[in-house]
Image (cartoon, rainbow, N blue to C red):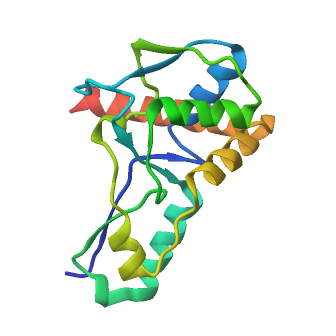
Amino acid sequence: AGWSVLRLPDVIGQFDNLGCHLAIQEALCRGDAVGVRMGGVADISTHRISVAYAPDVADAVLCVLRVGAGVYGETFHVACKDSTTLPEYVHAVARACGVSDVSLDVGLDSDLVSVDVGHLDVSKAITYLQWSPTDLQVAVQRTVAWNLVEDNSMYTHNLAESSDSSSSSSSSSG
């Protein structure tokens, strides 16, 4: 087999095409409640989640190409090494935004779409690919800073809207 699989949770950072993190960031900056409901998760305070940082995803792809045939047929999880809970993640985003008053709404679905999957173990990617993921707190801070530039947040909005319309048209045509 001449391929490898990279499995990703929600991706944050530059050029995020879903805008999930941006939606949380903007809600916090407006003072709105942030949805933290996750399908099938009884206790959001203990359920561990993972997120991937976009530059780390690109780096993991390059690592697979560099290692080559030695990792063909393998599946690797790509995410920040450290996991968090959804409430902890929202609070980290709030701190990076300078927001101290955070309202979590357990009756509203989370903007992050893969959080109900749980934490991904990235140790195989670290070992086999000699790959090094960014610390979650650093990834959150860099993502918030990137999104605070208006041109960047508009880019993400436009990309997310484009992804939404592509998903809608492909699912309605099938």
23 is higher (above) or lower (below) than 21: above
Q: Residue at x 70, y 33 (%)?
A: 95
Q: Position of residue 31 (x, y in %)?
A: 68, 13
100 is higher (above) or lower (below) than 32: below
**Depth check: 39 or 13 in front?**
39
Q: Residue at x 19, y 81 (%)?
A: 1
Q: Quadrant of residue 33?
A: top right
Residue 147 in view of the camera? yes
The quarter in which the C terminus is drawn is top left
Q: Residue 122 vs residue 41: left or right?
A: right
**Depth check: 44 or 149 in front?**
44
Q: Position of residue 75 (x, y in %)?
A: 26, 68
Residue 19 in view of the camera? no
Q: Residue at x 70, y 40 (%)?
A: 144
Q: Residue at x 58, y 58 (%)?
A: 135
**Depth check: 65 or 133 in front?**
133
Q: Residue 174 vs residue 60: left or right?
A: left
77 is higher (above) or lower (below) than 41: below
Q: Position of residue 164 (x, y in %)?
A: 45, 30
Q: Residue 60 vs residue 71: left or right?
A: right
Q: Quadrant of residue 173?
A: top left
Q: Quadrant of residue 159?
A: top right
